[in-house]
Every structure is written in structure tokens, then in C-alpha cells.
Image: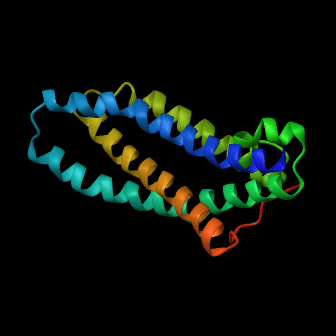
Amino acid sequence: MRLLGYYWGVIGVIGIIASAAYKLTPRIVELNLYPFAIQHWLFLLVFTPYMAYAEGYKGFYLNLAPRVLARALYLREAGGPFLTLTAPLFCMGYFYATRKRMLTAWIVSGSIVLLVAIVSHIPQPWRGLIDIGVEVGLVVGIAALFWHWLRFEFAGTRPDKAPDLP
């Protein structure tokens, strides 16, 4: 049962992020209908690497991915039936975590929902250009999760983040 929670936690988080990336794809494909001016190209050339760094590297690689793996390892070592059932949400820190971790998880998620609502009102091609940057950040995030997971599975490298348990 614990091993199930471990795998369900990591794969579930990857699935949540992949689902968000998949949902952005139609808006990015829609960009083919719009001619790009110089300001669009400049925005794309600046914003996309910024998102790869800020969202992908700083957000996912340095913080979320090692913490997800640390919490998944907790499931593997001491998780119960409820934590196994809700493993992806547990691994993201929505519950059974320190107060700071839960607040961070909920505030970041709420902020993302708010930003998605705001960006949905921005006209194309700007909306699609923003979505490209976000997509790149999400793909880097998925790669970061796989990287940390593979490092643990094959090299035995433990996550460098605490699981932030209560």
C-alpha cells in the first residue's frame, strides 16, 4: 500500500502539471493565425527564457520537485490509506504539512488560478505568447520532477528538501 502511495503521489503530480500544459496547447497553436510584429518577437524572446528560469528552474527544480519527492518518500516509509488515496495532493503540500507549507501551497495555487483568469481576458497574440512561456516553465517542471525521481531511484540521491510534515 505504501509503495502505491509513493508512485501515485509522484505520477499524480506529474499528471496535474502535464494536464495544465496540455490545456495551454490549443491557445498556442492558435497563434498561427496571427502575424507577429517586432514587439511580439521581443516579448517572446525575453518572457520565455524568464519563465523557464523563474517557473521551471527556481519554482519546480529547486523547490517543488524535491519537496514532492520528499513527501512521496514519506508515503513510501510511513503513509497510511488516506494519504495513499490522496497522494498527489499530499505530495503538493495541501494538507498534513506545516502551517507554512500548507499556506504556501494554497496561496501559490490561488495565485495561479487568479493569473489564469486574468490572462484569459488578454487578446491574442499576447495571450498565446504568455502561454508559450508558461508552457515552457511547465515542461521544465515536469522534466525536473522526472530528474529528481530518477536520481533517487537509480542513484539513491535523497531529496534536499524537508517534507514539511506537521
Q: Pinpoint residue 15: horizontal percent, then vertical percent.
A: 56, 39
Vertical position of residue 146 compared to residue 87: above or below: below
Vertical position of residue 4 compared to residue 141: above or below: above
Query: Quick check: can you spot residue 45?
Result: yes
Q: Toward which corner of the image does residue 162 lie, by quadrant?
A: bottom right
Q: The N terminus appears in which quarter of the rendering?
A: top right
* Residue at 90% across, 44% down: 80
* Residue at 26% across, 57% down: 46
Q: Pinpoint residue 93: horizontal percent, then vertical percent.
A: 74, 48
Query: Quick check: can you spot residue 59?
Result: no
Q: The C terminus appears in which quarter of the rendering?
A: bottom right
Comparing 56 with 12, the one in front is: 12
* Residue at 42% across, 30% down: 23
Comparing 19 with 2, the one in front is: 2
Q: Colour scheme in the image?
A: rainbow
Comparing 28 with 86, the one in front is: 86
Comparing 77 with 105, the one in front is: 77
Q: Is residue 13 left or right of residue 81?
A: left
Q: Is residue 96 left or right of residue 54?
A: right
Vertical position of residue 97 compared to residue 17: above or below: below
Count the marks: 0
* Residue at 69% across, 48% down: 7
Q: Toward which corner of the image does residue 145 lie, by quadrant?
A: bottom right
Q: Pinpoint residue 81: horizontal percent, then vertical percent.
A: 88, 38
